Structure formats: structure tokens, C-alpha cells
């Protein structure tokens, strides 16, 4: 058995690259330690904190944070420290509905991947990853987003469908999985002692912190769908800052929410800005909306969907009463909404008739994506709006938050505006684009409804710098929560 260690990251990667170019690695299998090879940070705490908060709630997150001094003292990667974090994070969590590993963690893992480590791993055709973290946390990102063929990690014990927070004993790796004569290993923890590893290249933690972050465009698979409430990376320090902010944040949240729904925007706007909730409006095409002749007609404002507050902010910034159509707005948010909202049925003919009536009596806002998308992508636009009118105004909307996301696929949607206003400095960006020319519409221009929908999507994507996709609302919910996002309310009405 031969091991070759190096503490210099660049030297390690150059060695692998050189050997690969000479063909010596063409038939070999890479076995690498996920944390030690690809992640820039050596700390495991942020990933357990994400699971603790998203799956267990705020109190479990706080308990994990309070235990961190002990974990740090014994060592995060030691067996004792790891067992403490696993127990506090997973004990009592329902196993069958646990989807944090596929819906939340991939985004944060990929944001921590270093370019040199990624390039070294990707130079091999066959890859096996090992990890000290439980399999349920790392398997999705490794297999679906990083193209790893197999994952070697420990399972968490369960009882009657609930996690016990205890790890199973580490099993010896199946030798049939790999031909031991053709293994190259990277990292501190590659295989068990009885597995023959020919070469091991090791980069130090100090060297990894200087690595360039892997650019988003280099991801083998883009992260388009992402769930969870936490927008920040919950390191011990940022977690401490979050809990220190919460008392003041809750007071500001209630003030912002109350001001936003009870006062006209020309009054509430400056107050919200003073309270830290800013609104940015692009006025490049704004003067055309001062034309009284145009404003007498019903205008259809078509926007991408970032949070349920999109129609409200559009109504505010153009200083004009609008109506909005929704699929799944909670009853509470319907009651407190300062603008008129109408619930759609997902029946094409009925919805078209409903929106046509609303347009005949005033202007309307629609979000043809059908669901929110928080990443820099646009989902496919439903073409239903294109048949209603030729008077279409695209509106590009973006939201910037620094602590909490104001959207959710699996949580309580009634809390979305509260989470948005709970951020220290939330910012809503609204860009009113040029009204569609007659040649780009259905009735006057002879375009098909799909062509119009795709054109509006492309204009909004260009204005925001977002990529347009053909993914739909159903794709999002199947990815994040395992169903199509439509269920029946007790009254029989469709909803999430």
C-alpha cells in the first residue's frame, strides 16, 4: 500500500492533472472525502444548523447553538462532537417526510465548493465520495449535483418512522464496489484501513480557505429550486447575530406589516424606508403611464413571481389601484390584502373568463409562473394571459434579503410576508418595462399565445439578468416536497 501526502493544494491538483494527462488515471476510480476535498470551510456546524432550523424549528436551532462551545472543545470532526450535533439535530424528526437534504442543503453545499477541489474531482470518470456527515444530508448534492457514482456515509437510526439521533456503526466498504488496484484517494477520510488505496493527495484546511468559490455557471447541474427559510449561512457567529436580532426584528416586522397594509404607499413608502424596508423602482418607461387616455383602459401587468407581495408592490409603485389573481393565497393574507385578490381554479376556461371580467373593470396583475422562484431563473410562463388583451406591460421584480426568505414550498405560506419583513434590510426592486408593441401581441400582431408568453418571459429575464427555463410549478413542488403542489382544502377549493 502506497500513500503520497502533500499539504499544498496547488501541488496536489497539479499532480493529479499531470497524472491524468499522461493517462495513468484513465482506468482508476477516485475515492475522496467530501469535506476535506471539495468544501472550503472545515466546519460542519452550518449544515447541521440548517437541518435543525428547517426541520426542527427555532428552539432546536437555539439548542444546537448553545451546545457549540462543547462541540468546539471536543472537536467538530471528532466522534463525540459529531454525535452531539447529530443527536440534537435529528432526534424526533420524522424520517418519511425529511427532504432537507434535497431541498435546502444542496444550495449551501455548492456555495462552499472550491474550484480547485471541484476540478480535481471532475477529472475522474468514476467517483466515490465519503463523508462524516449522515448520508441523508449529503447524498443528494453528491449524486444529483456533483455527479458522484456512490456515497459512503453512515445512516441514522430510526424507530417507528422517527430519527433517534444516533448513527449506525460504520460498516466496512463493499470491496465489490471498487477494484482496489485502481483507486486514487483524496482527503483525510477515504476508505477503511482494509481497503487498499494506492495514492492519497491531501490539501490543508488553511490552503482551502484561499480557494476561489466555484462559479454558479460551473455547477454540473444548476440549483433552480430551493426551499427553506434561512437565507444566510448559519455559522456560529451569524447564528448568534440572528438570535440577537430577533427581538428587535419581531417588533420591526409587525410595524412594517401594519404600515404596509394600512396606509397608502405615498405615506407608507417613506415610513417603510425609514424602518429599513426599501423599495427600488426603475423609471425608464414610467412616464408613458402618465397618459390619461391609456390609463382609462384596463392594463394587464405581467410580472415574474418572487413573493406573494409582488402585486402589492406593483400597485404601490405605479400609484394605481390594481387587482390580482392568485392560486393559493392563504385566507389570512386575502383578508388583510389592501388590493383586491381573486382566487383562480386552474380551470383554463373559467380562469380566462374571470380575468377577462376583471380587466373590463380595471387593471390587473398576473404572475404567469404560477409559483415563486427565488433563484436567478424564470419558470415557464403560462400563456393564458396572452389571449386576454393586447395591452400588456411586463414588470420585472426582484427581492433582496439577508437573513430570511419570504417564500416557502413546504412551510406555512401565511407567514411569508412576516419572514420577508423580519429581515434587517429587505429590498424590493421593481422594473416597469416597455408596453408590448402591437406586432408582439396575439390579436393585433397575429402571434400565438405561446409566442407572446415566451417573448414576455425573455424580456423580463433580460431585464433581471435571469435565465429562462421551461420548468413549471409542478416541477418545483415535485423536487422540493414530493408532490405536484395541489391538494384539496376542506371546502373543496384547490390550494397548496
Image (cartoon, grey):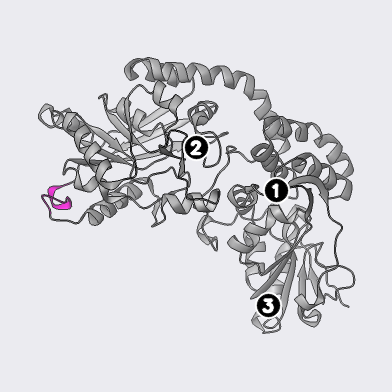
Task: Tell me: residue 466, above or below residue 413.
Answer: below
Say whether residue 26 is left or right of residue 334. right
Residue 77 screen position, x and y as percent: 83, 50
Report the residue at 66% width, 40% height from top. 55
| 1 vs 3, front mark | 1
Q: Which mark is residue 407?
A: 2
Say whether residue 492 is left or right of residue 433. right
Residue stretch in magenta: 437-445
Of 133 and 78, which appears nearest the observer? 133
Q: Disc 2 on helix, strand or loop?
A: loop
How would you rate the neighbour count of disc 2 (Cα within 10 Å): few for under 14, some for 14-19, many for 20 or more?
A: many
Residue 39 screen position, x and y as percent: 69, 55
Whether residue 371 is visible to the viewer of this picture, yes or no, is: yes
- Cα distance between the residues tagged 2 and 1: 24 Å
Label 3 belongs to which residue?
A: 18
How would you rate the neighbour count of disc 1 (Cα within 10 Å): few for under 14, some for 14-19, many for 20 or more?
A: some
| 2 vs 1, front mark | 1
Of 410 and 33, which appears nearest the observer? 410
394 falls in the magenta region: no
Residue 354 screen position, x and y as percent: 24, 37
N-terminal-most mark, 2 or 1: 1
Amino acid at each position: 500500500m502506497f500513500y503520497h501526502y502533500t499539504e499544498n493544494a496547488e501541488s496536489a491538483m497539479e499532480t493529479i492533472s499531470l497524472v491524468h494527462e499522461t493517462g495513468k488515471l484513465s482506468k482508476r476510480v477516485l475515492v475522496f472525502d467530501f469535506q476535506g476535498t471539495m468544501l472550503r470551510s472545515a466546519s460542519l456546524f452550518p449544515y447541521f444548523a440548517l437541518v435543525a432550523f428547517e426541520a426542527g424549528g427555532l428552539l432546536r436551532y437555539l439548542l444546537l447553538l448553545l451546545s457549540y462551545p462543547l462541540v468546539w472543545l471536543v472537536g467538530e470532526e471528532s466522534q463525540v462532537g459529531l454525535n452531539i450535533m447529530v443527536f440534537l439535530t435529528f432526534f424526533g424528526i420524522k424520517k418519511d417526510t425529511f427532504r432537507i437534504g434535497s431541498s435546502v442543503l444542496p444550495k449551501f453545499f455548492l456555495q462552499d465548493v472550491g474550484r480547485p477541489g471541484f476540478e480535481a474531482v471532475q477529472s475522474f470518470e468514476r467517483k466515490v465520495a465519503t463523508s462524516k456527515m449522515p448520508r441523508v444530508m449529503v447524498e443528494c448534492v453528491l449524486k444529483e449535483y456533483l455527479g458522484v457514482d456512490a456515497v459512503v456515509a453512515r445512516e441514522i437510526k430510526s424507530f417507528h418512522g422517527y430519527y433517534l439521533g444516533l448513527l449506525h456503526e460504520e460498516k466496512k466498504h463493499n470491496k465489490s464496489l471498487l477494484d482496489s488496484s485502481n483507486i486514487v484517494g483524496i482527503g483525510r477520510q477515504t476508505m477503511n484501513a482494509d481497503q487498499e488505496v494506492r495514492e492519497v493527495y491531501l490539501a490543508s484546511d488553511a490552503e482551502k480557505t484561499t480557494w476561489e468559490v466555484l462559479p454558479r455557471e460551473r455547477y454540473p447541474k444548476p440549483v433552480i429550486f430551493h426551499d427553506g427559510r434561512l437565507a444566510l449561512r448559519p455559522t456560529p457567529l451569524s447564528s448568534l447575530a440572528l438570535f440577537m436580532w430577533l427581538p428587535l426584528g419581531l417588533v420591526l416586522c409587525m410595524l412594517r406589516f401594519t404600515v404596509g397594509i394600512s396606509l397608502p404607499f405615498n405615506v407608507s413608502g417613506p415610513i417603510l424606508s425609514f424602518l429599513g424596508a426599501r423599495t427600488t423602482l426603475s423609471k425608464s418607461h414610467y412616464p408613458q403611464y402618465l397618459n390619461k387616455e391609456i390609463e382609462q383602459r384596463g392594463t394587464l401587468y405581467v410580472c415574474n413571481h418572487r413573493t406573494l407581495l409582488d402585486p402589492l408592490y406593483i400597485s404601490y409603485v405605479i400609484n394605481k389601484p390594481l387587482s390580482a389573481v392568485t392560486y393559493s393565497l392563504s385566507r389570512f393574507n386575502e383578508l388583510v390584502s389592501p388590493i383586491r385578490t381573486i382566487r383562480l381554479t386552474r380551470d383554463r376556461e373559467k380562469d380566462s373568463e374571470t380575468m377577462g371580467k376583471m380587466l373590463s373593470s380595471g387593471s390587473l396583475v398576473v404572475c404567469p409562473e404560477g409559483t415563486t422562484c427565488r433563484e436567478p431563473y424564470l419558470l415557464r410562463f403560462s400563456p393564458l394571459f396572452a389571449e386576454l388583451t393586447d395591452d400588456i406591460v411586463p414588470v420585472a421584480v426582484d427581492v433582496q434579503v439577508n437573513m430570511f426568505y419570504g417564500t416557502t414550498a413546504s412551510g406555512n405560506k401565511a407567514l411569508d410576508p412576516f419572514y420577508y419583513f423580519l429581515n434587517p434590510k429587505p429590498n424590493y426592486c421593481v422594473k416597469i418595462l416597455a408596453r408590448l408593441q402591437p406586432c408582439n401581441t396575439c390579436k393585433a400582431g397575429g402571434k400565438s399565445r405561446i409566442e407572446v408568453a415566451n417573448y414576455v418571459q425573455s424580456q423580463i429575464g433580460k431585464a433581471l439578468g435571469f435565465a429562462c427555463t421551461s420548468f413549471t410549478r409542478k416541477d418545483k413542488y415535485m423536487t422540493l416536497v414530493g408532490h405536484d403542489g395541489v391538494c384539496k382544502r376542506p371546502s373543496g377549493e384547490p390550494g397548496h
